[in-house]
Amino acid sequence: MAMVGINFQSGGSSPPIGSPGGTVLMDAKRLNLLKSNIRIGTWNVNSMFDLSKAHNVALEMTRLDIKIMGISDTRWIGSGQSTVQDKVIYFSGNNNSRHEYGVAVMIDETLKHTVKNFIPLSPRVMLLQLEAYCGTLNIIQVYAPTKDKPDEEVEEMYKDIQNILKVTKNQDVTIVMGDLNAKIGAGQNDEWVGRYGLGERNERGDRLYEFCQENSMVITNTLFQHHKRRLYTWTSPKHKPSCIIRNQIDFILIKQRYRNAVTNVKTYPGAGVPSDHRLLVAN
């Protein structure tokens, strides 16, 4: 799971969302992204088919004061919105009986009236837009194909993200986050990637870097120096003391113009949902 800190303040009211897929709420409450801190997370939970896991995610949000949580690999069917404890969850899954893939965004109930648009594009890509005084906060949650999937599926996902980005505006605060299943690697330091990545870049890391260049986005969890245990986001099932297999494959991307809004990013071990992915936090 990954989190990013953003500033906001709310006020006003809104009508309920009619149906998922692009309802715009013109009088939604607005976030002030300049005044108070809001934490945003992303987490590959390795399925929420067992609904008790969704409740555990909600509990973790409360415990860690996360207001917006992106979720990958829900394995839920269909798309829509629901309530989990004092949270509202928007989800996008397959339109068939196959419990695979799936993305979602869970938000604190206090933010539900800021939601102006929800587009469940595919089981791998969705957009949740929140009204802000400075424009719009766009949360694009993704779940990239694993390395055993063909490159064509990866390109289809990036095509979906590009289509979603057409809904956004340049002045918006746009975040793309989730399990990208890509290794960006260590040592590079430029406009799009910091020097604190992990390991060596692979081909899908090259594709992620290309996406960042094309869309002026920076990978926030490569910008800050921490011990490696605070950088890796995934542990292989084959991991053992004699053969350490850990990688940084979950990322939070933000528009380059807003990179200074993020002041720290690190992983949090021991979050209370069984998964081979770690919680990644940015402030």
Image (cartoon, helix red, strand yellow):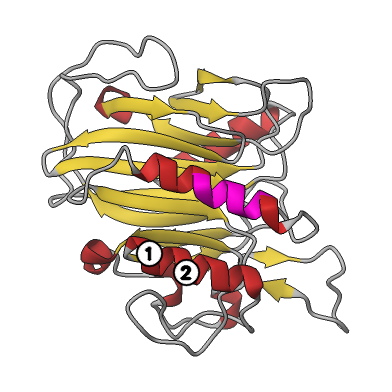
Mark 1 touches mark 2? (CB < 8 Å): yes
> Circle 1 sits on which residue?
214
Instruction: Estimate the x, y position of residue 159 in percent, counting from the top left.
Output: 51, 47
Instruction: Estimate the x, y position of residue 67 in percent, counting from the top left.
Output: 37, 41
Inspect the image, locate mark 2, and give the three-letter code of the amino acid beneath it.
Glu
Instruction: Look at the picture and state if 56 lies above or below 264.
Output: above
Instruction: Look at the picture and state if 8 lies above or below 84.
Output: below
Magenta stretch secondary structure, dominant: helix
- Residue at 16% x, 41% y: name it: 135
Instruction: Estimate the x, y position of residue 214 in percent, counting from the top left.
Output: 38, 64
- Residue at 28% x, 25% y: name it: 116
> Circle 2 sits on which residue?
210
Inspect the image, locate mark 1, and give the three-letter code of the amino acid beneath it.
Glu
Rendered image quadrant of residue 138: top left
| Magenta range | 153-159
Q: Is residue 158 magenta?
A: yes
Rendered image quadrant of residue 146: bottom right
Residue 133 in the figure: left or right of residue 92:
left
Residue 23 in the figure: left or right of residue 9:
right
Q: Is residue 3 magenta?
A: no
- Residue at 45% x, 18% y: name it: 20
**Looking at the figure, which quarter contains the C terminus?**
bottom left
